[in-house]
Amino acid sequence: MTDIKELKQWVVEHQLEEKTVENFWKVFFLWKEEDKEEFNNTFRLEFKREELYVYTDKVALTITNWPDEDYNHVVVYLKFEYNDVYIGNYRMVFDLQGEIEDDYFVIDSWVD
């Protein structure tokens, strides 16, 4: 089994968490501009950036092409909350060289 501390160190060395948070904000503000109706419905027209809490939920090593193990990734999962209400998640997929392969931005709920 791979040493978890070694994986954690690799994630830190390749700045995967920082890259994920940075890209989250780019995608978040693209969503705000490109889908204003959904954005405004989600935040009830009162969005304040300082009220949005973004945090790393987990990091996972995935063997995507099981059982061949020739297409593997590290995935960084973020969650975001607004005024203590869970809104959605963002995950970024990295290859084993630390390069971005894909990302996913999901809105799960709306502010009441």
Image (spheres, helix red, strand yellow):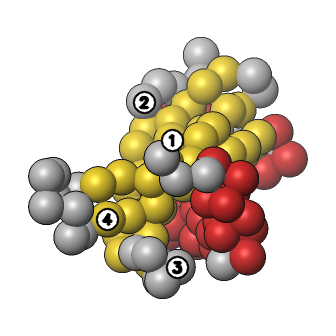
Task: Look at the numbered discs 1 and 2 and tell me whether their residues touch, using CB distance below 8 Å.
Answer: yes
Marks 2 and 4, how far apart in space? 27 Å
Residue drawn at x 76%, y 40% as measured from the top left:
53
Q: How many other residues sit within 10 Å of disc 2, few (<14), some (14-19) or many (≥20)?
A: few
For marks 2 and 3 on the same chain, the one whose residue lies earlier in the sequence: 3
Q: Quadrant of the C terminus?
A: top right
For marks 2 and 4 on the same chain, the one whose residue lies earlier in the sequence: 4
Mark 3 element type: loop
Instruction: Answer above or below: position of 91 versus 13.
Output: above
Q: Which residue is mark 2?
A: 108
Q: Would residue 28 appear left or right of 73 to someone viewing this image? A: right
Instruction: Tell me the mark number nearer the camera, choosing from 1 and 2.
Output: 1
Q: Residue furthest right?
A: 50
Give the amino acid at mark 4.
Answer: Asn
Q: Which residue is mark 1?
A: 89
Give the amino acid at mark 1.
Answer: Asn
Q: Which residue is mark 3?
A: 98
Instruction: Tell me the mark number nearer the camera, choosing from 2 and 4.
Output: 4
Instruction: Answer above or below: position of 30 versus 56.
Output: below
For marks 4 and 1 on the same chain, the one whose residue lies earlier in the sequence: 4
Mark 1 element type: strand
For marks 1 and 2 on the same chain, the one whose residue lies earlier in the sequence: 1
